[in-house]
Image (cartoon, rainbow, N blue to C red):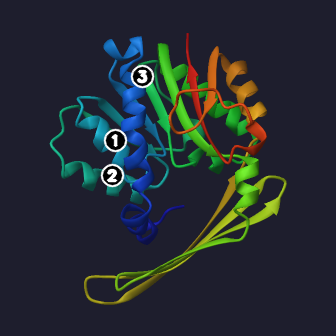
Amino acid sequence: MYGYYLSQAYDKYWSRFSKRIAPVIYTFYKNEPVSKRNKNLLDLCCGTGQLACYFSKRRFNVFCLDRSMHMLNCTQKNLKKIINRGSVNFINADMVSLATSSCFGLVVCTCDSINYIANKKSLHHCFQRVYSSLISGGVFIFDMQTPYGINKKAKEIEIIDNDEMYIVNKQEFNGDNVGRIIITGFVRDANGLLHRFDEKFINKAFELKSVFSCLQNVGFQKVLITDESLQNQSVNLETLEWAYIVAKKI
């Protein structure tokens, strides 16, 4: 998952989301009482570290977790470009098997990475581990494609074509709220040679009511399903294409 060439493409073309959502999450968290006593952030499926860079600049101690070592290498490279004010740690692991102590005030999982979890059992286990990693008053913020959104994007195709790369990013809907992402690309190296890569991913869209129940079952007492503003409870969950969930540990 996310080999060398795809990680390079991701860093260049698909890291915009993290750059956009990072200040929104930061603003939300700094208004939480827990932020005054805890600046430890766990970034699940950290990608190439754009969100980590934003928080590191603001004196957070950032823990970057990703199952792809190639993505973590990009994260390390990007963090070297900034002046770190907080500490940075790297964890090569799957978020479902997360093993940390209760030391985080904030845990995030962005860019619909939750949709990579295969089933409800694994989702429940992941939420349990996140809950255990948070201190009292801690916050878990993540986003996800909904069943409505993943079905609406069936057969969506994105093409990137320039001198550096040629990439076809195709999403197919297989039914049962499951989508398949197929990415084929050619990346040119420093010597002008093209390298082909092929990667496939399964996207599982969980019903929002099921996600809500799962979070409450593991102990989260306050759960907000909202939009990118992270402000108000969304009313029409059936027509929400992309959901943002804020869960608090009391």
N-term-proximal mark, 1 vs 2 = 1
Residue 146 higher or lower than 170, as above or below: above
Q: Quadrant of the C terminus?
A: top right
- Distance from disc 2 to disc 3, alpha carbons, whole Å, reads 20 Å
In which quadrant of the rendered view does residue 11 lie?
bottom left
Q: Position of residue 42 (x, y in %)?
A: 42, 32
The mark found on residue 75 in the picture is 2
Residue type marked 2: Thr
Dot 2 alpha-carbon crowd within 10 angstroms: few under 14, some 14 to 19, many 20 or more? many
In this orientation, which residue lies closer to the viewer: 74 or 13? 13
**Of 219 and 148, which appears nearest the observer?**
148
Residue 128 in picture, x, y percent from top left: 63, 25
| Contact between labelled residues 2 and 1, with CB atoms less than 8 Å apart | yes
- Residue 217 is situated, as x and y percent measured from the top left of the image, at 73, 20
In the rendered image, residue 183, in percent from the top left (x then y), is placed at 57, 72
Residue at label 3? 104
Q: Secondary structure at mark 3?
A: strand
Amino acid at circle 1: Ala
Tell me which amino acid carries mark 3.
Answer: Phe
